[in-house]
Amino acid sequence: MRSNRMFTFFMYSRYNNLFKGVSWVVASSIIGSVLQFLLIFVLLNFYKQEEFGLWASITSIAAVIVTGDFGIVNVLRNIISREVLNGSKGLAISKQYFYSALIFFMCLAILLSIILLFISSYIPFEHLFKTDNEYLRQQGRAIFLIIQFIFLFNIPFSIGIPLFFSFGESKLYSIVNSVKSIVAFMIVLCLSINKIHITSVAVAYFTSNLLISLLGTLYFIYKRKWFTYSFNWWDCYHKIREMLTIGVKFLSIQLFSSFLQNVLTIYAGSMVGLGVAANINVVQKIFSFFGGIYQSAFNPLWSELASAFQKRNYDWCWSLLKKSVCITITFFSFVVIIVSVLGDFFMKFIAGNEFKSNVSMFILVGILFSIRIVFDNVSLLQNATNKLNTIIYGYSIMFVYVLIVIPWLVQQYGIELMILNLIFMWGLFIVLAYWDLRKIINNRKNIENSCSLNKEEL
């Protein structure tokens, strides 16, 4: 009886802590999304179209550089989530992995910055920033180099922030991200009001992000009391090699996911027409606003699943995933209905009267977007435990199918059948991820039961 009460208290306490973490992260994501929207509004009103185009080109590079961590940060987060359960010994091991990754990325950032500096004169910037404004083109070259340096150093400088999740400190992660969004917006607003050139605004924006990320990582080190580190080249090499082996899998998933997320707009623009592609892209951005906020809740879920799995709380992992998937399906069912009904309003508010889309397109794109998020939800445990092989196989098959079959479908039957086909494929992928999830949990349970039987026999 007492053990049942303790288990019930444990379950309540864990769900309560998880709810608090999710609340903090979602609140931070809402602040960031709203301020990002207001930031674009400010830039569009204070700068000319070509100047804003320069900003858009520069910020788009960030999406590419984000994958420059080779998936190591995700692996590091999973390793630390596992090791913190082993007490002081686990914390010592975690510190070794943390500093190995930090040193690796610092050395890589310095090396790539030097290489970039030497080859910059050979980079055809006129293809990156096509404009008749000679001053803007010259500034584009200079700002490209500065922003690239900032992006490269932002990887090691920000490495500590996502690791707050491994220690159940979602609140600190959320505070750092909120401060980053608020400071960046205020800097852009003040500089824009004072008519400062767009190149200086861009540098100030990314520099503020870099410095606050550095402060966040320094606070992470202070919080852990990891002030000393005994560096060993051989040990560092082995740890980086270990993390890279798994990190490449995360990188593959990121690249596959990015392509499949944007393939609808790509194929619509190349095979149907730019007008259709523009409409679809705006519809996707509307759903992405809600999706980005919602998916931020997956971060604390990820770390909780990693921790619970290492503690052998498999039933709790299964229960959490079932509940979160039900919430995801319910939430996005309402989002699809509301956005589809108010579609014209959203389109005019965001893009103006030129953009129009019918209700069926909103429903189809909404279901496609929602089913992708359901897949991300179902596959959370695989990501949290580095068990990614089945997910990568599924992505590879889907990638080949989309490259070979989907173009023929679009040319023969139109964009609607392409969307229906993608929905069906994502549905099959969810079934595969679900099967893999059950297999992982059942295998671990069987191993635990076998070990218990062997101990009893002895």
Image (cartoon, helix red, strand yellow):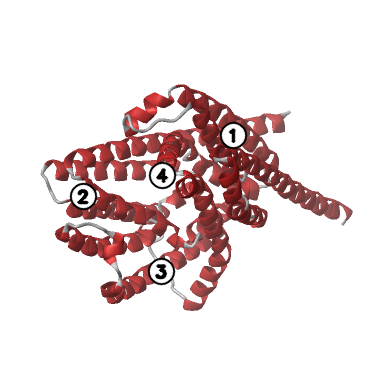
The mark that comes first in sequence, 2 or 4, is 2
The mark that comes first in sequence, 3 or 2, is 2
Q: Are marks 1 and 2 in contact (CB under 8 Å)?
A: no
Q: What's the distance in space between the residues labelled 1 and 2, CA to CA?
A: 43 Å
- Note whether 386 is above or below 437 in the view shown: below
Q: What's the distance in space between the residues labelled 3 and 2, CA to CA?
A: 37 Å
> In which image quadrant can residue 150 be found?
bottom left
* Residue sitting at the far left: 194
> Left of 152 or right of it: where is 377?
right
**Element on which disc 1 rests:** helix
The mark that comes first in sequence, 3 or 1, is 3
Q: Residues within 10 Å of mark 4 (few under 14, many from 20)?
A: some
Instruction: Choose between 53 and 209: the one closer to the eye.
Output: 53
Q: What's the distance in space between the residues labelled 4 and 3, CA to CA?
A: 45 Å
Please give the name of the residue rendered at 87% of the width and 57% of the height, measured from the top-left corner.
458
List the residue tagged with mark 4.
Answer: 274
Q: Position of residue 397 (x, y in %)?
A: 65, 55
List the residue tagged with mark 3.
Answer: 103
